[in-house]
Image: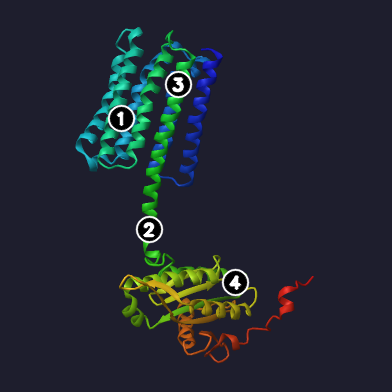
């Protein structure tokens, strides 16, 4: 092997090793059987290329007889393992009996054929191993094309990867046999096909693994999210409030819980229908989140009640500003689709209830109940925002509450030194 050949195959090995490292990091971050199969695929391809390209022989000088056996078995064994993993990747046992039986049979027959080749005369062993590996890879290509025709969206990319595998394996065995006509140009082409095959197949393996992970995550989070607004739902709101209460007890910081209640929904439903009402809720959730800020949790406690969790406050007087801004924003018209398909503006009857939380511990159910009670009281106030008065236990308009001194224009613009 000359210097150019060594550089060519070393670069190919580096690209394959980079893909293996990326999958290994993914496996360490989110362990799963599919991730492990992806790592093993790249590692096995890396070993096959290392053995057949001659880089291992050039660098480590292994014992010739043992190394020859390794070269004979490398191709059939690698293709067999890939077929076994692709059978799971395609879910062939659920999709098509022919695909499942062919892949399972090839995973068994190819290694056995590799060992049987060792009984042939030595000069015939590498050509026979190449033929067996190419036959197995051709079977894989046919099955992935069949899966693509059945509607598998990732199978076409897998088929292209398998198509690149055919010249890659042929080139690797030609290199291993040291054919006189297989010069540097052909080796560069074979190395490129090897890298493209490894990259494309590795990509679709990762894509399907990501789809499965997202499906499991969605299933796990389904009960935590409101299906209309996609914000945390009832039990998740309570869980977040309990966690915030524990943290505030440690930090001794003040916080707040705000309830936004929507009234007269039945009247609106009669005007705009269920679709229009859902559009309204989505718009309200977006406005609440914008006013509360992304650092504060916004959830839908039940169908007509949103909850805002302000875990820490820099000043209680900020509640006055936030409450008034939130109430004003929610009372602006919202454009929704009516039952006749036309767009129309509706005004929502809302109330914003605020409970100021001191560092002392309080029950989450009591906090949520008081916040909703304040929201109901706010419906009858001009500003539509009420806060619980700790002294009287009643709701007062937030603009009239004793939340500390109001900041003047000079205080808002000048930062003390």
Give the vertical position of 180 relative to 113 (above or below).
above
Which mark lies nearer to you, 3 or 4? 3
Which mark lies nearer to you, 1 or 4? 1
Give the vertical position of 344 relative to 131 (above or below).
below
Q: Residue furthest left?
A: 97
Separation (CA) of disc 1 from disc 2: 36 Å
Mark 2 or mark 4: which comes first in sequence?
Answer: 2
Determine which residue is flagged by label 4: 312
Mark 3 or mark 2: which comes first in sequence?
Answer: 3
| Neighbour tally class for label 2: few under 14, some 14-19, many 20 plus, Cα within 10 Å | few
Residue 220 badge:
2
- The kind of secondary structure element at disc 4 is loop
- The kind of secondary structure element at disc 2 is helix
Residue 141 badge:
1
Question: Observer-nearest residue: 264 or 13?
Answer: 264
Separation (CA) of disc 3 from disc 2: 46 Å
Residue at image location 45% in from the left, 78% down from the top: 365
Residue at image location 57% in from the left, 87% down from the top: 390
Q: Residue furthest bottom?
A: 392
Which mark lies nearer to you, 3 or 2? 3
| Neighbour tally class for label 1: few under 14, some 14-19, many 20 plus, Cα within 10 Å | many
């Amino acid at each position: 092997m000359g210097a150019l050949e060594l550089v060519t195959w070393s670069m190919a090995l580096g690209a394959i090793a980079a893909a293996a490292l990326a999958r290994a990091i993914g496996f360490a971050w989110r362990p799963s059987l599919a991730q492990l199969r992806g790592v093993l695929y790249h590692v096995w391809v890396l070993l096959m290329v290392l053995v057949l390209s001659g880089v291992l022989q050039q660098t480590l000088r292994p014992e010739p007889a043992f190394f020859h056996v390794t070269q004979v078995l490398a191709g059939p064994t690698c293709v067999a393992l890939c077929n076994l993993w692709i059978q799971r990747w395609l879910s062939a046992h659920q999709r098509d009996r022919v695909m499942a039986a062919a892949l399972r049979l090839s995973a068994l027959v190819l290694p056995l054929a590799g060992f049987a080749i060792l009984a042939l005369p030595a000069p015939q062993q590498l050509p026979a191993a190449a033929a067996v590996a190419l036959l197995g890879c051709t079977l894989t290509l046919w099955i992935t094309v069949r899966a693509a025709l059945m509607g598998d969206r990732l199978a076409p990319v897998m088929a292209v990867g398998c198509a690149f595998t055919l010249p890659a394996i042929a080139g690797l065995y030609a290199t291993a046999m040291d054919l006189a006509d297989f010069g540097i140009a052909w080796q560069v082409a074979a190395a490129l096909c090897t890298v493209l095959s490894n990259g494309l197949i590795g990509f679709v393996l990762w894509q399907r693994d990501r789809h499965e992970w997202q499906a499991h995550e969605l299933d796990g989070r389904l009960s935590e999210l409101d299906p209309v607004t996609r914000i945390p739902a009832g039990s998740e709101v309570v869980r977040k409030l309990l966690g915030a209460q524990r943290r505030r007890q440690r930090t001794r910081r003040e916080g707040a819980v705000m309830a936004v209640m929507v009234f007269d929904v039945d009247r609106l439903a009669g005007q705009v229908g269920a679709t229009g009402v859902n559009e309204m809720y989505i718009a309200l959730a977006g406005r609440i989140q914008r006013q509360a800020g992304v650092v504060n949790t916004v959830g839908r406690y039940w169908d007509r009640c949103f909850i805002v969790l302000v875990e820490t406050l820099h000043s209680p007087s900020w509640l006055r500003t936030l409450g008034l801004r939130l109430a004003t924003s929610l009372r602006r018209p919202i454009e929704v689709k009516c039952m006749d398909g036309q767009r129309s503006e509706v005004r929502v009857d809302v109330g914003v209830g605020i409970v100021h939380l001191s560092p002392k511990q309080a029950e989450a159910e009591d906090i949520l109940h008081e916040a909703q009670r304040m929201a109901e009281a706010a419906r009858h106030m001009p500003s539509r925002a009420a806060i619980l008065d700790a002294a009287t236990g009643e709701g007062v308009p937030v603009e009239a509450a004793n939340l500390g001194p109001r900041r003047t224009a000079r205080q808002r613009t000048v930062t003390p030194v």
